[in-house]
Image (cartoon, rainbow, N blue to C red):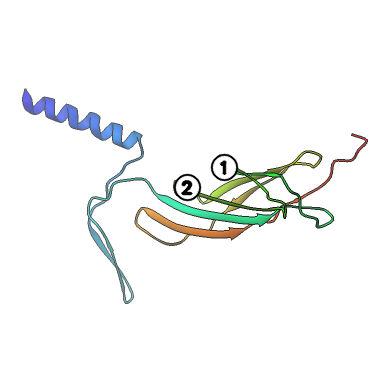
Amino acid sequence: MKQKLNKWWTRILVMILAFLGYACGDSEKEEEEEDIYIYGPDLYGCPSASYKIIGTVMDQDSLPIAGAQVRVNWDAVKTDSTGTYSCEGSNGGDYEVCIVTECDGYEKDSVTYVLDFKGGNHWYAGHCDTTYNPILHKIPENQ
């Protein structure tokens, strides 16, 4: 009876961990030419990565826009008096972020940006420093 109960609890725990995104890998070795890649035993967790996106928000006349809001996924920052912004965050291993830029009197800009992570291994996908300079167009006054 106790053995059946332990198997039941183990199965429930495994399902909960799988639902939360945790996984396990075995030890194995792969040889490619002269490099040997060794994967550690029992790796638990979710992939993660960090990024820093900087840039300058300008209008169609190449003038900086102060006070524009720049959203990167769920994080939002405002541009300073020179139109520059900086946004840092972490990503659960996703390689794309949605960057939305908006300011009163200007049309909204939205782009899906692909991040190029470098320096990661195992569950840490690495870090990405990148620049994105959105250009906002004024809304015509007759609208």
* Label 2 SS: strand
- Other-residue count near label 2 (Cα within 10 Å), few / some / many at <14 / 14–19 / ≥20: some
In the image: residue 119, left or right of residue 95: left
Q: The C terminus lies in which quarter of the figure?
A: top right
Asked if the residue under mark 2 is in contact with the one under mark 1, i.e. CB atoms within 8 Å, the reply is: yes
Residue at 27% from the left image edge and 50% from the top image edge: 43
Q: Amino acid at mark 2?
A: Asn
> How many marks on residues?
2
Residue assigned mark 1: 73
Where is residue 46 drawn, in percent x and y?
Answer: 37, 45
Compared with 89, 118 (above or below) is below
Residue at 81% from the left image edge and 47% from the top image edge: 137
Residue lying farthest top? 1
Quarter assignment of residue 21: top left
Quarter assignment of residue 121: bottom left
Q: CA distance from mark 1 to mark 2?
A: 9 Å
Residue assigned mark 2: 91
- The dot on residue 40 is none
- State the residue in front, 75 or 91: 75
Where is residue 134 drawn, in percent x and y?
Answer: 71, 52
Where is residue 35 drawn, in percent x and y?
Answer: 32, 73
* Label 1 SS: loop
In the image: residue 122, left or right of residue 94: left
Q: Amino acid at mark 1?
A: Asn
Residue lying farthest bottom? 34
Q: The N terminus lies in which quarter of the figure?
A: top left
